[in-house]
Amino acid sequence: MPATIKVGDNVIKAGLRYAPTHEWINLQERSPRVGISDYAQRTLHDLVYVELPKVGQSFKKGATLCSLESIKAVAEVYAPVDCTVVEVNDALSEKPELINKDPYGEGWLVKVSVKGGGDSLLTPEAYAEVVKKQL
């Protein structure tokens, strides 16, 4: 299995699960990280502000987890699973552009404890089909 899948200029990282709304979660980690996909950060362009939730906040799948502000728009990030925030990426307060530079690495948004499974999330291959339809 390749480490990444390319759809146009968009990179989709293997080993993650994806929501159709362009969030990713790494369910293989003890405290899974959540972020937005390369496609999502490209669509938003240059991010200038990130409003992260507070540690301890709980979210139902599909609820607004945080918001991202770019020079073009404000976008909501949705919880890919029922979860509670256990850590936020404080580096984004000073450097929101980390999301643009490294959406699957340093640009992660929050770490969560998952309540229930991620059974309805998309595999990288299935998410690639979602991105293809939106290009």
Image (cartoon, rainbow, N blue to C red):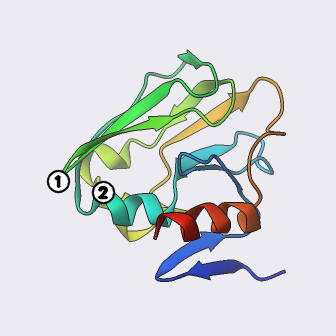
As helix, strand or loop, the secondary structure at mark 2 comes to: helix
Q: How many labels were placed on the picture?
A: 2
Is 124 in front, or is 93?
124
At 69% across and 43% down in the image, what residue appears? 32
Left or right of residue 64, residue 24 in this image: right
Question: Residue placed at 43% from the left, 58% from the top?
Answer: 40
At x 53%, y 16%, the residue is 57
Q: CA distance from mark 1 to mark 2?
A: 7 Å
Can you identify the residue that label 2 sits on?
A: 44
What amino acid does circle 1 point to?
Lys
Tell me the number on the disc at residue 72: 1
> Do the residues under discs 1 and 2 have CB atoms within 8 angstroms?
yes
Q: Residues within 10 Å of mark 1 (few under 14, many from 20)?
A: few
Indicate the amino acid at tag 2.
Leu
| Quadrant location, the N terminus | bottom right
Residue 98, given in percent of the width and then of the height, sits at 36, 61
In the picture, residue 7 is in which quadrant? bottom right
- Image vertical order of residue 21 relative to residue 135, above or below: above
Task: Classify residue 59 by image quadrant.
Answer: top right
